[in-house]
Amino acid sequence: MKNLRNVFCLLFICLIALPISAHGQENATVAKSLISKITTSTSPGGFPKKSLSVNQSYSPADYPLKTAGSYVDYLYDSWYSYHYITFETVSSYSSTDLNVQILYDSDYSYSKDSIINVEFLKNNGGTLEYIDATEFDTYGFTNLRLNSLGSKSLFQNQQYIYIRVGVSEYASDYYYSDVIQFKVVNPFYTPPVVDKTAPAKPTVYTVSNITTSVKGKAEPFSTLIIKSGTTTIGTGTVLSDGTYSVAVPKLTAGAKISVYAKDNAGNTSTPTTVTVIDKSPPAKPTINSVGDNQTIITGKAEAGSKVTIKQGSTTLGQSTATSTGYFTIKMTAAKKAGTSLTADATDAAGNKSSYTYVTVVDKTPPVAPTVNKVTYTSTTVSGKAEKFSTVYIFKGTTLVGKTTTDSYGNFKASIKTQAQGSSLEIISMDKAWNQSKSTWAKVY
């Protein structure tokens, strides 16, 4: 086939009798347009033709960068001819299209593979992806300017335009005789604006030892990071309105946590450091028995807490529990039996316990009874003692009479007649089992 083609070329030259010189021609311009839609192969880097040479790479790193006006390389074809490729420029063809210009030179006009394909690729996550190609037939030419027009949008977000130039004898060939590959700067690429501004440090609402989430405000859509020391104890995303709520384990009162905001560009704010406050109320105090004959109240409460004793809304006394939890409160006066008192403990953080209720008990013994005259003929013993108390009458250790006083304190107990000159012991005991002193009555 190639021999027939050579014969045809010689006959054509003889018939027109015109000399053809490869270097005598001007750079003719051939314009081809890229298809506006991307026709991506199902496999990454799927090219329309394969290469018989080793230049068949999918990696952007294998494409050398060429500047405007620089020589790229040569193609060696099946006719043993050379095709020289020079990158000229990338220019704006219109508001929406660009023009990639390549200068083509060869040593022969006809005795060569004449089909030149200029392929365009883009970088898709580190692997080249075929976009489209322009095809040029250089038969009869030694010098051409190859113009490939295409939409600028095809190379949107691409810093470089990746190019493969292949040569084949016919357009229908499945293989290139040779391929060269290179990349050029895309002059219409706008680098993304890099966010280097750290978010403002977050606002953090009160964090306590009963808190199970940290709340506040920070840059919308940033990531909230909460640390205790160097340990991350919670992360979350700030909502569009700038609020956040991040779950954390319960923390110890007095501990410090640091809260950071990290934006989508990876910028991290300075931390907001907060101290975990104490919101746990102390246990209610324990109160020892309070008698109506005492002004000192004792008991136990949380160490260092302030204990308050009240009667209704009136404060009767306050004291601070020692390091071991003991407290002592002095009232100005004893309270009547039956009086209801309350006690509560307030810790250093201001947390107040629930109330302990205590009733003042009767600890005061009744006064000694008074006894009317008793004779050897008396069958009763009468007198006065504390009202509603019980009166006991003994002869030695023998109980000889017992009765209860009325609401006025009067009593009258039945006894057997006693020997003249003997003595009786009269004792009063109130309802709280407080015992009076003894009164002695002589039998006349």
Image (cartoon, rainbow, N blue to C red):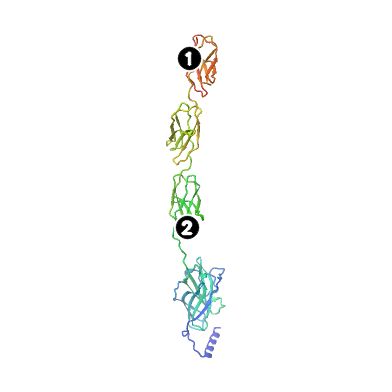
Q: What element carries label 2?
A: loop
Task: Where is residue 47? Give x, y as percent.
Answer: 54, 72
Q: In which quarter of the image is the N terminus?
A: bottom right
Q: Is mark 1 in CB contact (under 8 Å) with mark 2?
A: no
Mark 1 Cα-neighbour bin, 10 Å: few <14, some 14–19, many ≥20: some
The percent coordinates of residue 435 (x first, y second) are 49, 21
Q: How packed is label 2: few (under 14 Cα within 10 Å), some, or many (20 or more)?
A: many
Give the answer, above or below, for where 427 lies relative to 212. above
**Taking 428 as reference, is 319 above or below it?**
below
Q: Where is residue 220? Give x, y as percent.
A: 49, 56
Query: Is there any visible trace of residue 439 in the rendered image?
Result: yes
Pick whichever, 171 or 355, lies toward us: 355
Q: Distance between the residues labelled 1 and 2?
A: 96 Å
Q: Nearer the viewer, residue 78 or 205?
A: 205
Mark number displayed over residue 263: 2
Element class at badge 1: strand
Q: Which of marks 1 and 2 is nearer the N terminus?
A: 2
Residue 2 in the image: above or below residue 120: below
Residue identified by numbered label 1: 440
